[in-house]
Structure formats: C-alpha cells, structure tokens
Amino acid sequence: MSEVVTYNREGSIGVITVNYPPVNALSHAVRSGLVAALEQGQKDADAKVLLLVCEGRTFIAGADISEFGKPMQDPGLPSVVDQYENCDKPIVAAIHGTALGGGLETALGCHYRVALSSAKVGLPEVKLGLLPGAGGTQRLPRLTGAQKALEMITSGEFVGAKDALALGIVDAVEDGNDIKAVGLAYAQNIADEGKPVRRVRDLTDKLEADKGSEVFEQFRAGLKKKARGQFSPFKCVDAVEAAFSLPFEDGMKRERELFMECMESPQRAGLIHAFFAEREVSKVKGLPKETPVRDIHKVGVIGAGTMGGGIAMNFANAGIPVTIAEVKQEALDKGLAVIRRNYENTAKKGRITQAQVEERMSLISGTLTYDDFSDVDLVIEAVFESMDLKRKIFGQLDDACKPGAILASNTSTLSIDDIAAATKRPQDVIGLHFFSPANVMKLLEIVRCEKTSDEVKATAMALAKKIRKVGVMVGNCYGFVGNRMLHKRGAEAMALVNEGASPQQVDKVLTDLGFPMGQFAMSDLAGIDIGYSIRQERRKAGEDVPASWMDKLAEQGRLGQKTQAGVYRYEEGNRKPIPDPEVDRVIAEFRQEQGIKSREITDQEILERCMYVMVNEGAKILEEGIADRSLDIDITWIYGYGFPAYRGGPMFWADQIGLDNILGTVEQFYDDLGGEQWKPAGLLQELVSEGRRFGDL
Ligand code: 3HC
Ligand code: NAI
C-alpha cells in the first residue's frame, strides 16, 4: 500500500484517504495508491460503502502539473476514474478546500459527492492550456447541461459549494470544517438507506435536452473575441460537444485525442511555465524564508492623483485603513471623488455591494499634513516624477513617521537609492512600483535599495500577497525591469514608424502576438505627454535623443485618450483607437523634414525589432543582477504589461524562438542600425556559445 493513499475501515464504511501535501495533486504515487486502496475496499466484505477523503488543506487539487511534458506512467488518471465509477459498491467523495481539474474529475467518477460549504470546485485546465482530460468534459455536462459546463470548462473559474449543489455537481453541502466526519455521516446514510451506485456516465436527460443546441456555436463565436489567439478554449468546446454527439466511450476517446493535442501545444508549455513562475517569484534569492516581517496596520499615501488613488484602494480593499496626503484641499477632494466613483462603478456592475462601497470609503481618509502620518506603518509616495520633490518629501517623512515605519516610493524611473539617501533610515526605504490602473493590475515591482533591510524586503513581499498582487523583487536602475524594457521597445516602435511603418501596423504585430494593446494604443492610454517630457528631460541633460514625430503630436496637444486624440483618434465615451489621416500627415511631414525616404517594412521586421530589443535588454538586466532570474522578468511582463501568458513571458518566449536565432538577428541590427540597444548582451552571447537557454540559468 502506498503511503500517500491509505485504506481503513470505520464501521461499515471503507475509508480511502489521500495524504500528499501540499495540495494532494494526482502524482503517480497518488494514482497507484488510489487504485490499490480501491481494490482493498472492494475486497473488504465488511465495507458497504466507500468514502474518498483527503487530509490537509484541500481535496485533490488536480493532476500533478510537474509531471506534464514527461512520459505518463500507468495508471493514467482516466483509467483510475473509470475504476472508481465501475466499482459495484457506492463511493462517496467528501470535498473540502478545492476539488480542481483531475480532482473534480475523480469526484465525478465517485457515485455521490458531499462538500463543506466553504469548498470550491472547478475545471481550471484551460488556464494551463489544456482541457479536462479524465472525463470532465463528458461527465460534467451530464450533470449541468451544456451551457454551464461550457462556461466552467472554457473559463476555468471555480464554483462555490452552494452553487455546485444547485447545479447538481454535488449532492449535499454541510457547514463545519471536519470533512472526515461529514463524509462518514453521509456515507453511513447511503449505507443505511441502501442507496445504489449511481454512475454519472449513465445520466442522459441533460444530454437529450441540449442535443443539437446552438450553444456550442455561440461559445465558439464568443471565444473568438475573448480567447483570441488561444488554442485550448476552442478544444474545450469540441470536447464538450462530443458528449452530446457521441456515446460515452467514444466521447472519452475524443476527449483524450483533444487533450493530447493541447498537451503538445507550445501554449501548454508557456502557461505551465507561467503557473510555476508565479509561485517561484515569491521565493526571493538570498532572502531567508524565516525573515521576520513587520505588521502593516495603517498606511499613508502621498498624492491623490492617477496612481495614489488606485494605490489607496488596494489597502481599503484589504481592510487596511489608509490616509492620503495632498498639497491642496481641492486636489484631495478630487482624488477622493475619483475613488468613490470607481467603487460606485464596480458596485453598478454588481461586483461589490453598496455597503462594501461605504465600508471601503470609510477606511480612506484625507489630510493636508504629514503630521497625520505619525502612527502609520508604511507610507507610499506617489507625487510627480521629480527627484527634488521626492527627496524633499522623504526628508519630511523621516521626521514625521515613527521609527520602523517603511518609506516607499512609487517612482517609475528615478533612483530609489538617491531617494533613500534623503533620509536617516535608508534601511527602511524601498520602491513599491504599482502599474496603472493601480487597483487593477496585478504586478507590484518591489525595488530593493542598496541598504534596504531583509525585514523590509520580506514585509514588502508579504504585503503584495495581502493586497492580492504578484510581487517581484528587482534591483534599482533606470525604469527597473518593466519600464526599462518597455522604453527600449517604445523607442524601436517609434523608429520603425520613422522609417516607413504605420503605427497601426506596429500595433497589429504586437496584438497578433497576443498583447492586449499595441505600443501606440498604450502610449495614448498613458498620455503622450509622459514620454515627451521624459525625452525632453533627457535632451536637457545632454543625451542624444533623436527627434520624433511623436514630439510633434505632443506639441500639438494630441496627448492621447485624455484629449480624444493622440497617435489615434477617439470617439466620445469610446476607448477604441481609430487610425487618423491627420497623424499620417504629421508622420509624412516629419519624414520629409528629416530627409527620410520611407520604405516598406515587413511584419517580421517589426516583430524582431520590437521583441528582440526587449530580450537583449532583459539579458542585460539579468547580467547586471537587476532581476535574479529570467522568470522574474516573465512574470513582470505577464502581470504588468499583459504579455500573453500562453507564451510564457518574453524570456521563455525567447528560449522557444532559439537564442542563437535571436543573437544572430541582434548582431545584424547592431551592424545595420547601431545604437546601444542593439549591442549584444554578453549573457546572450555566453548562453549561445554554451548551448544554454535563459531557463537554464
Ligand atoms: N500539481 C503540482 N503542484 C501543484 C499543483 C498541481 N496541480 N497545484 C499546486 N501545486 C503546488 C504549487 O506549485 C505550490 O508549490 P510551492 O509551495 O512549492 O510553490 C503549492 O502546491 C501550493 O500552491 P499555491 O501556492 O498555489 O497554494 P494556494 O493555497 O494559493 O492555492 C490551489 C491552492 C487553489 C490548489 C492552487 O495551487 C491551484 O490553483 N492549483 C492548480 C490547480 C489546477 O490547475 N488543477 C488542474 C491541473 S490539470 C489537470 O488536472 C488535468 C486533468 O484534467 C487530467
Ligand atoms: P499625478 O500627476 O496623477 O498625481 C500626482 C499627485 O501628487 C497630484 O495630485 C499632486 O497634487 C500630488 N502632489 C504633488 N506634490 C505633492 C506633495 N508635496 N504632497 C502631496 N501631494 C503632492 O501623477 P501619477 O501619474 O499618479 O504619478 C505619480 C507617481 O507614480 C510618479 O512618480 C510616476 O512616475 C509614478 N507612476 C505613474 C504611473 C502612471 O501610469 N501614471 C505608473 C507607475 C508609476
């Protein structure tokens, strides 16, 4: 008997217990153990009913993802589930925590399901580029009908126990937290009432009702928009449809074929890399797990502008009181009104209640003086991007805040070390770089200064989790990880238009790659004046920043979405970018002034110049130790800039393209175009010469 799955009998109930921390994933040992325990239960004449239950924090949370991509060892999960379903003694699955993927599929192979009211169930395989491959696409629709099964399987969203009961996925829901006691009581009831085995595969009424329904075509049409560029959501629809058009056994075969197609897709590899990378970023190199963290009970934010307001909302959402400081009452009132409006809009969409709006607003207060920061545990500064102003504010905060309070800046480009030097507590200073809109975007770049203490670093990482962000620890340099790479891409995109591409051609290449918006649509969203003032500052500082057609747009007051005109034009109340002949005229005029003869630019050149410049910069970032691992860069881009998770992030993507290919092209661009950005990174050269990849570092 395997140690991870045990069998014992309690009265007339044969109990099969899985104990494979942390989440009882269906590793080879668990699958074999499940089969062995079932055999024991079947042979045990005194066991009238069998109960499947799990130890620890959750029911089985799915297949063991770390086994994907390797040869699958018998018994495969579909066969394990079949053996449970074919058992001639009734089997009850008792669900606590989350029954996900293969876990829910195993439960669907059991004859009855009872869940704690706190439990959740779901088939999240699509989020890993897969589809449920152990009968989920065939059994779930037999319980819920087509619509709900398609919703759950194509979205991967979880369903709470009470909803699962209403949908027929579970048969009973009980309060409390002792899952074994709940399971035993339910199983005893089945035994006492002499209830028979009840196999989901044999249920047909929901299938009959939805046979030939248009719902499948409707889902495909909807996914064309929602899941653009993705592979597995469409395969999920095909698999569910098979449940309605084929007998069970044939439907299972079809599911397997489609599952294997997904398994072999590069998107599966990208999404699984992203899954593990997201968990790995929380383990910071050189930061011991047991590092103490400081309590954050009360927070101060400076600046109630675009970022300050969004930052404050994160804390209110997490139940942490937050005080926002502004210079003028008018700016404060305006900032607080914007926050309220954001909450009201969320309530209108039904995502929070009006009571929650009031509760969150009551956690946010305003002030015009830092005296109100004497008892805060953390202050995040989000004022204009000016070093002088930030240094002045940090000096004042040093006096106003209690010892041990953490002082953080949301600067997107300035040196955190220089800001920290304005205080007498550089060990308590750190960068907390949020992404706009700060209450929505999941990334938090946590910028360590030279002197930041381990305790402050660990506190920042823990805080990210608390406010439901993905925290990535990075080093201090211009633009840190995300914006440093973005600015290189931006300059290249601008140059491509100088040379002959149109902004919409550049943007289309990026959206075809899977970005939610292109470089220029993004500039319009952020405001063209931001890039313009950065370029002007750099010119003033004596840097050689080439002239640009975008400078002309900024000078004409075309600042982006906020003026309904930027690189694109916008219609009232609509964020859709519309190409504008006026911009084409500005570009043409600029080329003429500069004596540039416009040339045809291929989509492939756009892709290589926009993406390889980022990869080359990413390699420099790794070389300099600004990011510890390539996966830190991948997660920064997935959560900060919408890099398609199914491509695994820019560095994983580069590994798939082949670093030798990339280096060859980078060298070519360096010869043809010149510029520091195309100087091949030493690390890239080293990896290619050793036949290694970023993922091997
Ligand atoms: N396989 C292997 N390891 C897994 C895993 C899985 N299915 N699910 C979680 N883990 C690991 C994580 O990597 C992490 O490891 P670490 O501590 O070494 O970093 C650890 O378990 C804990 O995970 P979390 O940090 O995510 O813990 P949470 O409590 O926040 O979340 C969870 C728990 C909700 C179960 C979440 O981990 C999750 O969503 N897991 C994935 C579930 C899933 O996608 N299942 C479907 C798998 S595909 C499948 O079943 C195919 C089948 O149809 C054939
Ligand atoms: P913003 O201009 O919208 O807001 C700045 C606010 O700070 C204004 O309301 C202003 O009144 C206030 N302010 C100025 N001096 C102050 C002082 N001494 N005390 C209190 N309040 C003061 O600017 P935004 O866009 O919110 O940017 C703030 C910071 O966040 C900048 O450092 C920027 O680089 C950074 N950032 C901006 C992002 C964006 O997309 N806008 C993204 C990430 C970081």
Image (tube, rainbow, N blue to C red):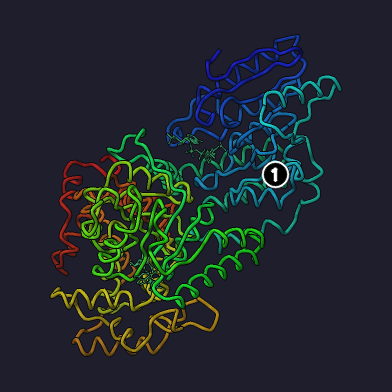
Q: Secondary structure at mark 1?
A: helix
Relative placement, left or right, of 116 versus 453 is right
| Spot occupied by residue 521 in the image (x, y as percentages of width and height) | 41, 73
Pick whichever, 662 or 15, lies toward us. 15
Pick whichever, 509 or 552, lies toward us. 552
Q: Residue at x 19, y 74 (%)?
A: 538
Quadrant location, the C terminus: top left
Is 632 located above or below residue 525 in the figure?
A: above
Relative placement, left or right, of 163 versus 414 is right
Q: Residue at x 50, y 63 (%)?
A: 365
Badge 1 amino acid:
Ala
| Spot occupied by residue 206 in the image (x, y as percentages of width and height) | 79, 46
| Residue sitting at the far top | 45
| Spot occupied by residue 43 in the image (x, y as percentages of width and height) | 70, 10
Q: Is mark 1 within 8 Å of ligand 1?
A: no
| Spot occupied by residue 284 in the image (x, y as percentages of width and height) | 32, 41
Tell me how many marks there are: 1
The residue indicated by pointer 1 is 243
Pick whichever, 236 or 553, lies toward us. 553
Quadrant location, the N terminus: top right
Pick whichever, 429 or 176, lies toward us. 429
Say if residue 570 shows up in the picture.
yes
Q: Residue at x 56, y 31 (%)?
A: 57
The quadrant where residue 555 appears: bottom left
Is 115 located above or below residue 615 in the figure?
A: above
The quadrant where residue 601 appears: bottom left
Q: Residue at x 54, y 58 (%)?
A: 363
Q: Residues within 10 Å of mark 1 (few under 14, many from 20)?
A: many
Say if residue 657 shows up in the picture.
no
